[in-house]
Amino acid sequence: MLKLSLLNLFRRKSRTFLSLLGITIGVGTLIAMVAVVDGTYSQFNSLIAQFQGLSIMEKDSANQTLSKLDITLKDKLENVQGVRTVLPEIWLMPTSIDGKSLSLESMTSTPPFIYGVDTMEYTKMRGNGWIGELDKGKKLQPSDNKKAMIGAKVAETYDKFVGSSIKLGDKTFEVVGIMKNESSLMETIIVIPLDDARIMSALPVDKVNSYYVELENAKDDGKIKKIIEFKYGNELDASTSSDYSDQFSSVLGNFRMVVILVGLLAAIVSAIGVINTMLMNVMERKREIGTLKAGGWSSIHIIKMILIEAALIGVIGALLGLLLGLSLTYILNILFGLDSVITQELLTQSALFAIGLSLFAGLYPAYRAAKLDPVEAMTY
Amino acid sequence: MAKKSQGLIEAIEVKKDYQMEKITVNALRGVSLTINKGDFAMIVGPSGSGKTTLMHILGALDHPSSGKVYIEGKDITTTDDWELTLIRRKKVGFIFQTFNLIPTLTALENVMIPTEPLKIDENEVIKRAKNLLKIVGLEERMFHKPSELSGGQRQRVSVARSLINDPQIIMADEPTGNLDSITGLKIISLLRELNEKEEKTCVMVTHDQNLLKYATKRIYIVDGMIARIETGKYTETLSHELP
Ligand SMILES: Nc1ncnc2c1ncn2[C@@H]1O[C@H](COP(=O)(O)OP(=O)(O)OP(=O)(O)O)[C@@H](O)[C@H]1O
Ligand SMILES: [Mg+2]
């Protein structure tokens, strides 16, 4: 029966091909899009996982570079019960690296960014905060100036080693450390001493952009956030890692829904294609189906044959779709430096969905075939 | 009227109407006949006289509008589609004017196709199908596709196909209609052979007056009614008339 259905399918190659194409493209793009979204999500989560404290910004500022906080806030924060270290931060984009402007890179992936930290406080920290773990070289020391720790991607792109020099704008820095390639969002980081960053950012001496607050006990973040906001809530916002991931999840979750809806729409269109193909196949084979019935096939047998044909379209379409999805994701990763994640779950779910959809699309044609009156089928 | 039937197939006052948009076509207007075991019956008559309709009803492919049909004493007019399917599967093999083979399958696979959805040992079916192809003289062509066979050869494949479930009855609707007269005669002689050696009962529809002499029973039908039925044992031998 399987062989018969397979042969039936390939009797009308171009027609079958077209409905296969619909499913293949649907499954392929769905997989690629979801993989990109999931990849971004897991990147963000691995970043958030290493962030175990509070991020302090000026009240109602959209991000760190737009925030401006008084340097005196450092002592106030340090005096809050449960706070271990307070790291003043300055964030900015380099105007150029090694004399090359950044316009092109910034269009495709996360552009390099400068993260200025108080080196004294940084050495006191137990964790790594935003920075991540060091791979080669050593950490910035309290007395360092014109020195930098760089992300793995920056090292790769600009061909830097420990001991190389890197020119940020018109200032030259010595690379003392290279970070582990943990999260693509942080692999373009360039960490320099706070004062060097201040000069580039043109912030006044008594201002920084933000603070990273390390806690004695990371589990207390919710409680300490409340205390800090109670005391200084009129000038700052404090965010825990779960604030970040909640915010990010909800944005990304919505985006994922949109992607899946688009995929579903594509699926419905391709299901209509399958229905059309199968109906035409049935109508064309009226006489044949009538002969099978005359030869003792029951309606159930006919239904089975047509449904197997439909399922085969689904199976082949799904397999091709998986291939397309995998290659599309691979190409996107290379072209745009993404770290898309294709889960086993995504693959099996989209394949099963395509097969189920095809089977569903085969129901009506199968019903029509089963209802064919053998006598009438013969007279055409 | 509900007498117990003696023949293999018995039709009593069978009528068949086709309801068209405005008019009703009375394709059969009260046909009664008996087909006995071992008969080689031919249904003859002008085009549109109801031959095909009658054959379909006798072969459990179609319900009459009224009247009774018995196959081996079983009333098939009150049965549902499922039971008709079972009767066709076990008792009747059909042969069509247009062969109706599946173009993607080989001769052997086409012969086997009626058994495909049934749970029968495949090797057993292959053995049977090969034997049938041998009987119809096509053992050398069993792996050919229909497109690689001549019209006569295709019709032999469909004769073999009609026999795969070992039915008692063969129903053939103008099996020679698409063949030249010599090839047609070969098919008739094949059916005669099956009738005589394998004891198959044949009911065949034909236009061709020349074929009538090969029948043991001739049913003349005009305008949906039986004009006359001739029964006569077939006496001449067929073989010397064939080229
Ligand atoms: N499905 C149908 N719907 C309506 N009318 C039909 C149908 N089938 C047959 N008829 C009509 O019933 C009558 C008998 O048809 P049938 O096919 O039995 O004739 P026939 O003797 O086999 O003719 P032919 O020798 O041309 O094959 C014809 O008038 C035909 O038009
Ligand atoms: Mg006819």
Image (tube, helix red, strand yellow):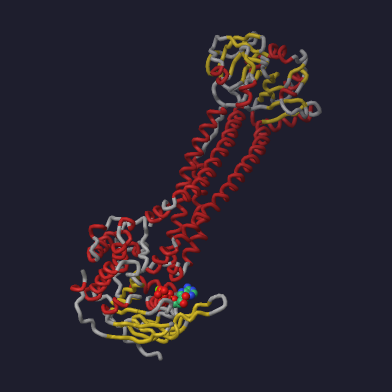
- Considering depth in this image, is A261 or A144 the residue closer to the camera? A261
Locate residue A293 relative to residue A49 in the image: left or right: left
For the point 49% across and 44% down, the residue is A348
Locate residue A137 relative to residue B198 in the image: left or right: right
Q: Indicate the position of residue A73 as horizontal and vertical percent values.
A: 76, 20
- Considering depth in this image, is A286 or A7 the residue closer to the camera? A286
For the point 33% across and 71% down, the residue is B93
For the point 37% across and 59% down, the residue is B102
Q: Indicate the position of residue A240 as horizontal and vertical percent values.
A: 68, 31
- Considering depth in this image, is B100 or A161 the residue closer to the camera? B100
Q: Quadrant of residue A252?
A: top right
Q: Which of the image's four quarters has the C terminus of chain A?
A: bottom left
Q: Indicate the position of residue B74 as horizontal and vertical percent values.
A: 37, 81
Is residue B61 in sight in this rendering? no
Is B157 drawn above or below residue A318 in the view shown?
A: below
For the point 39% across and 66% down, the residue is A291
Is A209 drawn above or below residue B72 in the view shown?
A: above
- Considering depth in this image, is B189 or A366 the residue closer to the camera? B189
Q: Which of the image's four quarters has the N terminus of chain A?
A: bottom left
